[in-house]
Image (spheres, rainbow, N blue to C red):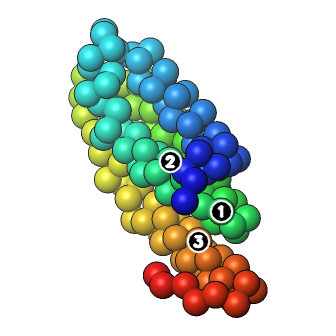
């Protein structure tokens, strides 16, 4: 299986861009890069998982599902960031960033599940069209 083909997919590119923008947004309010990298897994962890899933997504449906999930997560991240730091700023705003990944986890779990089921069904369909039995 060639993972490099997955790394050039539209879902991978969109997710990588949103992840890079998210790290940039986190770094804009940080004092140093170490603090940004310490906060990134909590705030942007679901995007890292989506990035991993995009390496295996070959079907158009799974790509679209991951792109929609990434855009929704990016929008939620930006909305919550604006709420925490600009609409109602407080000294505890940084703690809110710790919970972004946990708040979005149920929705992202559905996105990953749908995408993975589309990946599996695409493998079955391609194996049936070739007349080969596939083991999953």
Viewer-proximal residue among 122 and 3: 3
Question: Where does the image place residue 128, in percent across and percent down from the top left?
Answer: 69, 89
Query: Residue at coordinates 26% horizontally, 27% vertically from top-left?
Result: 38
Q: Is residue 101 left or right of residue 56?
A: left
Viewer-proximal residue among 5 and 30: 5
Q: Quadrant of residue 131?
A: bottom right
Q: Mark 1 or mark 3, which is nearer the start of the sequence?
A: 1
Question: Where does the image place residue 11, in percent across and percent down from the top left?
Answer: 64, 49
Q: Quadrant of residue 96?
A: top left
113 vs 75: above or below: below
- Neighbours of disc 1 within 10 Å: few (<14), some (14-19), many (20+): some
Viewer-proximal residue among 88 and 49: 49
Query: Residue at coordinates 46% horizontally, 46% vertically from top-left?
Result: 47
Do we see residue 88 in this rendering? no
Do we see residue 116 in this rendering? yes
Write down the residue under mark 3: 119
Q: Nearer the viewer, mark 1 or mark 2?
A: 1
Query: Residue at coordinates 52% horizontally, 70% vertically from top-left?
Result: 116
Q: Mark 2 or mark 3, which is nearer the start of the sequence?
A: 2
Write down the residue under mark 1: 58
Q: Quadrant of residue 132?
A: bottom right
- Asked whether disc 3 touches disc 1, contact meaning CB atoms under 8 Å apart, the reply is yes
- What is the CA distance from the residue labelled 3 to the residue labelled 1? 7 Å
Quarter of the image with the N terminus is: bottom right
Question: Where does the image place residue 22, in percent across and percent down from the top left?
Answer: 49, 30
What count of labels does the image hold? 3
Q: Mark 2 or mark 1, which is nearer the start of the sequence?
A: 2
- What is the CA distance from the residue labelled 1 to the residue labelled 2? 13 Å
- Neighbours of disc 3 within 10 Å: few (<14), some (14-19), many (20+): many
Write down the residue under mark 2: 51
Viewer-proximal residue among 75 and 17: 17
């Amino acid at each position: 299986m060639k993972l490099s083909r997955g790394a050039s997919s539209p879902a991978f590119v969109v997710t990588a861009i949103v992840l890079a923008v998210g790290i940039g947004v986190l770094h804009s309010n940080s004092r140093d890069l170490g603090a940004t990298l310490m906060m990134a897994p909590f705030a942007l962890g679901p995007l890292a998982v989506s990035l991993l899933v995009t390496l295996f997504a070959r079907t158009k449906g799974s790509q679209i599902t991951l792109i929609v999930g990434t855009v929704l997560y990016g929008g939620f991240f930006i909305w919550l960031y604006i709420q925490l730091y600009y609409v109602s700023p407080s000294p505890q705003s940084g703690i809110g960033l710790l919970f972004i990944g946990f708040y979005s986890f149920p929705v992202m779990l559905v996105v990953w599940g749908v995408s993975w089921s589309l990946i599996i069904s695409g493998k079955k369909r391609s194996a049936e069209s070739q007349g080969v039995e596939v083991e999953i």
